Amino acid sequence: MSDESRVMTGVVAGAVIGAVVAYVIFTSQGRRALDNIDGTMDELATALERFRHALRRADGVVHETRAAVDDVRAILKG
């Protein structure tokens, strides 16, 4: 790709990004879309935190199970 085509690609990309930002900032539909995205991100963050908590609990169960199995083995080896 030549320098000129890279510059044109950068200009076009900048124009598109600028248009999207202007739409979000200056139109009511854009602000509503941003609010919806923000709410969705909050929901996603909450879901991920719940998932992380579930993984921690599962990890605890695995450790407790291993300990119980080790105890049973020790008793059986007696």
Image (spheres, rainbow, N blue to C red):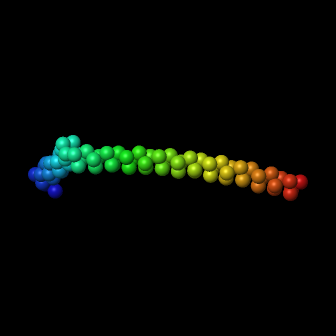
User: How many numbered marks, from 0 up?
Assistant: 0
- Percent across and percent down for residue 14 are 17, 47
Indicate left or right for 35 with 51 as reference.
left
Identify the residue at horizontal 76%, vertical 52% (top origin): 68
Q: Would you say 37 lies left or right of 44 here?
A: left
Determine the residue positioned at 57% across, 50% down.
54
- Looking at the image, the residue that sits furthest to the top is 25
Quadrant of the drawing holding the C terminus: bottom right
Q: Is residue 61 visible?
A: yes
| Percent of width and height locating residue 45 | 44, 46
Of residues 51 and 23, the one nearer the viewer is: 23
Which x, y percent locates residue 42? Answer: 41, 45
Dividing the image into 4 quarters, which one contains the N terminus?
bottom left
Q: Position of residue 28 (x, y in %)?
A: 22, 46
Residue 3 visible in the picture: no
**Residue at the spot 56% in from the left edge and 47% down from the top edge:** 53
Residue beneath the point at 43% across and 49% down: 44
Residue that sits furthest to the right in the current view: 78
The answer to which quarter of the image holds residue 75 is bottom right
